Image: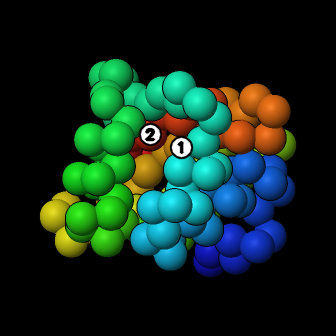
Amino acid sequence: MTIPVNQLTDPAVRAFVKALNANDETAFTAALAPGATMSDDGSERNLAEWTDREVFSSRGHMDVESESDGGLVLVARYRNDTWGEMRTKWRFTVEDGKVARFETGQA
């Protein structure tokens, strides 16, 4: 079972997932705080390069299975044209209504 994006608890996380799933780079950038950072499987990544490769050029999509910690931690089936589908965990840090950091990796 998946949680509809519009029912995600945290507004910043909801905006992030909605933009990612719509492949909307403008809305995605707007959901991020200035200087936002990220890691993938425990390794720091360049956010712009990673999102271009793993999300926008490969049509990434998240189907959220569960949320915890007030909506700041998601478990989702993530798929893109490069890697197919995998179960992933996402942890968000939100500051001033924007995603300041996210950490993702296999769940």
* Gap between marks 1 and 2 measured at Cα: 4 Å
Give amino acid for label 1: Trp
Residue 104, disc: 2
Colour setup of the view: rainbow
Quadrant where the N terminus sits is bottom right
- Left or right placement of residue 39 versus residue 92 in this view: left
The front one of 36 and 68 is 36
Tell me where residue 83 sits by quadrant.
bottom left
Pinpoint residue 4: horizontal percent, then vertical percent. 70, 76
Q: Residue at x 45, y 30 (%)?
A: 38
Asked whether disc 1 touches disc 2, contact meaning CB atoms under 8 Å apart, the reply is yes
The residue where tag 1 is placed is 90
The reply to whether residue 20 is in sight is: no
Which residue does the image show at 53% across and 26% down from the upper left?
A: 35
Q: Position of residue 78 (x, y in %)?
A: 40, 62
Q: Position of residue 58 (x, y in %)?
A: 24, 67
103 lies left or right of 85: right
Q: Earlier in the sequence, mark 1 or mark 2?
A: 1
Q: Residue at x 45, y 61 (%)?
A: 25
